[in-house]
Image (cartoon, rainbow, N blue to C red):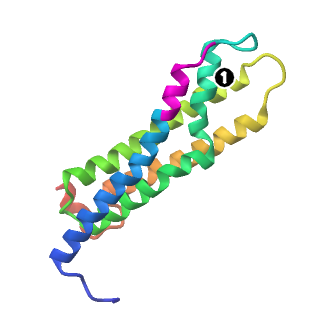
């Protein structure tokens, strides 16, 4: 109900459960990344592209916006849970938030490599592929920014207590 603070025990239990849920959501992204890494490992060069070009192309599929959206639930749950926890953040919650941000930042790097690979191909530049990767990079940047805001406690009443 508006205006009524939940009991500390109730909030602590909610924070604990949301932290577990966040890790489960992050597990979905881990699974997808590992699936793509296995595909990258098995790529051979073809007569049209080198093995390196093919590997970058396969890895860059994680940068497509529909695939990158799998990271959003973990980031959202982590950020909301950090604000609910206030200064009583658990190490598991901190790690969840930072690993989620780290994955998003890493995926921005993958997007840059993919754009460079697409732009340097022989023949016409495939702008559709570049725009898709830029869209994914935008989502990844938003995820990283959300995690950073939550980590700093911007907008939370107790932000000074966590960093004191």
From the top left corner, tell me how far across and down residue 158 is, in percent: 24, 67
Query: Is the stretch drawn in magenta largely helix, strand or loop?
Result: helix
Give the residue at x 65% y 12%: 45
Q: Judge whether residue 40 is colored magenta.
A: yes
The quadrant of the image that shows the C terminus is: bottom left
**Residue at left offset 70%, top offset 25%:** 118
Quarter containing the N terminus: bottom left
Q: Is residue 72 left or right of residue 2?
A: right
Residue 142 percent coordinates (x, y): 51, 51
For label 1, the crowd category at 10 Å Cα-Cα, with few meaning under 14, some 14 to 19 and many 20 or more, is some
Q: Is residue 42 above or below residue 159?
A: above
Compared to 81, does 55 lie above or below? above
Residue where numbered disc 1 is placed: 117
Name the residue: 59% across, 18% down: 43
Residue 93 drawn in magenta? no
Residue range in magenta is 35-44
Residue 31, image x and y in percent? 44, 40
Label 1: element kind? helix
- Taking 153 as reference, is 11 left or right? left
């Amino acid at each position: 109900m508006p205006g009524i603070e939940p009991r500390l025990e109730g909030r602590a239990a909610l924070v604990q459960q949301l932290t577990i849920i966040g890790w489960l959501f992050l597990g979905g992204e881990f699974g997808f990344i590992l699936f793509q890494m296995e595909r990258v490992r098995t790529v051979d060069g073809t007569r049209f592209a080198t093995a390196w070009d093919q590997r970058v192309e396969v890895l860059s599929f994680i940068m497509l916006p529909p695939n990158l959206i799998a990271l959003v639930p973990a980031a959202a749950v982590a950020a909301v849970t950090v604000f609910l926890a206030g200064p009583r953040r658990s190490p598991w919650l901190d790690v969840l938030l930072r690993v989620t941000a780290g994955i998003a930042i890493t995926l921005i790097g993958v997007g840059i490599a993919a754009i460079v690979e697409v732009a340097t191909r022989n023949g016409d530049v495939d702008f559709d592929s570049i725009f898709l990767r830029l869209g994914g990079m935008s989502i990844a940047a938003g995820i990283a920014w959300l995690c950073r805001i939550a980590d700093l406690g911007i907008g939370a009443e107790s932000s000074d207590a966590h960093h004191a």
